[in-house]
Amino acid sequence: MDGALRYLETHRERFLTQLLAYLRIPSVSAQRDRHPDARRAAEFVRARLEEAGCAAGLFQGDGLPTVHGRCGEGAGRPTLLVYGHYDVQPPEPLELWTSPPFEPVVKEGEIRARGCADDKGPSLAMVFAAECWTKGAGGLPTNLRFIIEGEEESGGSVVQRYLEAHKETLAADALVIADTSGVAKGVPALVYGLRGILAAELLLTGPSRDLHSGGYGGTVANPATALGRLIGSLHDRRGTVAIEGFYGAVKPLEATERARLAKVPFVETAFLAETGSPSLFGEEGYTSTERETARPTCEINGLYGGYQGEGSKTIIPSRAGCKITCRLVPDQEPEAIGEALRLHMEKHLPPGVRMELRMGHGAPPVLTDPETRWAKLARGALEKAFGKPCALTRAGGSIPVVNLFQKLLGVQPLLIGTYAPGERAHSPNERYFVEDFYGAIRAGIHLFAGK
């Protein structure tokens, strides 16, 4: 252990330099013109695994490759499976970035770049933690298996094909995922629950073409107006989702869990300053932490329709639409929520327009036991790495592949939160504190000790 930690201190600058080189690769899986860059990122990860002393390769499948690696083959030792992703969210809108998203800037201990926190920094930290053991301490005390995929942000299936083809050789004692945040700066977390997700897109059409609003206004329905009415029907004035049956399968929060979540630090003024919102808002009867992590939501993610350019264009648009995601909690199922959403839209559809509701990707929620042996080991590793008590919490986001690992491999996920919240993942000016990067490496070193 001491040798691994000393190796980290000796190679801090090199590790940071390699992270910055990784962040310069614009590996946006959702944009096809970036796929050659994404493949460069896969090659970069493979090279880092090999540099760490692992046997590594690429599984090509029918999309962006999944990087796989193996470190340690000792019989009778525990095996940990480490998951991460090298692809990143699109950086747009570019004009809101204070520096180019793929030209990382380090200022006052903070990295600014797309993908720095989600998930290049934390997942690369796990690779470097393995290197600290193999080159600084003479070898790993555990067997490690790495899976770093390239389609997490776009819902591809290559990693599923890899798991299905290799599940016999991927048996592990636990699954390590460093793709969640802590609860405050310098305060790590073990995340024992994730919300599920259902994505959908609603399209309303009216006239066969855009119409002059003077010549036709008041004679046919406006799809943009109809869309506004439909969106408004999704919630009541108190923030409760108004879709019939939406809450029917929701597992109530037990008093013990509410008490646990009440211990998670939440400072309203700091939260509002980070979001830029003027006030809090949400479902009555629940704290902000509960709303954010343990209650279901229905959100509009984007709107389109009509003229968007400079100045005025007086039309009745022929079509209008929106993108929707519902975040789900136990025991909601994506298929059931999708059907409830469809029935709601049909019931509330204004006259004079036609509706098409397209279902996108979905994943059920995840809830694990935070008191298992490996969960306790993960909490201990985080506390040693950061010098602070490890918080227990649930996360508001979704990592659909977790369900896949559980289904195919039956392995418990250890979702270790190693970076400060407010990282602005999926938003302009994504940030990652350099000390959180080193903290993640230390956490990996302690966890890979297996005791």
Image (spheres, helix red, strand yellow):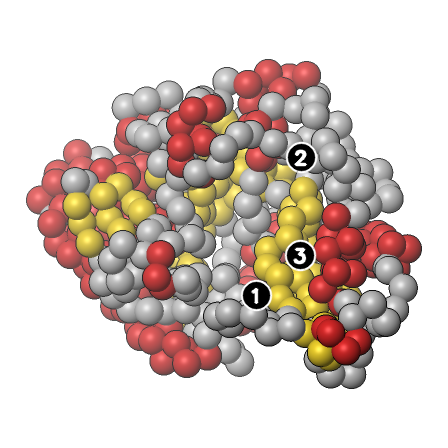
Secondary element under disc 2, as helix, strand or loop, is loop
For the point 75% across and 48% down, the residue is 232
Three-letter code, disc 1: Gly
- Residue matched to label 1: 155
- Residue matched to label 2: 295
- Residue 379 sits above or below residue 422 on the image: above
Determine crowd level at label 2: few under 14, some 14-19, many 20+ residues with C-alpha closer than 10 A.
many
- Residue matched to label 3: 324
Determine crowd level at label 1: few under 14, some 14-19, many 20+ residues with C-alpha closer than 10 A.
some
Q: Nearer the viewer, residue 146 or 226?
A: 226
Answer with the quarter of the image where residue 66 lies. bottom left
Secondary element under disc 1, as helix, strand or loop, is loop
Three-letter code, disc 2: Arg
- Residue 212 sits above or below residue 246 on the image: below
Secondary element under disc 3, as helix, strand or loop, is strand
Nearest to N terminus: mark 2 or mark 1: 1
| Figure quadrant of the N terminus | top left
Q: Nearer the viewer, residue 310 or 318?
A: 310
In the rendered view, does 188 fall on the left or right side of 263?
A: left
In the picture as drawn, the residue positioned furthest to the bottom comes out as: 208
Q: Are marks 1 and 3 in contact (CB under 8 Å)?
A: no
For the point 35% across and 50% down, the residue is 430
Q: Position of residue 186 (x, y in %)?
A: 31, 29
Q: Position of residue 329 (x, y in %)?
A: 69, 40
For the point 70% across and 68% down, the residue is 320
Whole-angstrom CA distance, mark 2 to mark 1, is: 23 Å
Whole-angstrom CA distance, mark 1 to mark 3, is: 16 Å
In the picture as drawn, the residue positioned furthest to the front comes out as: 214
| Figure quadrant of the C terminus | top left
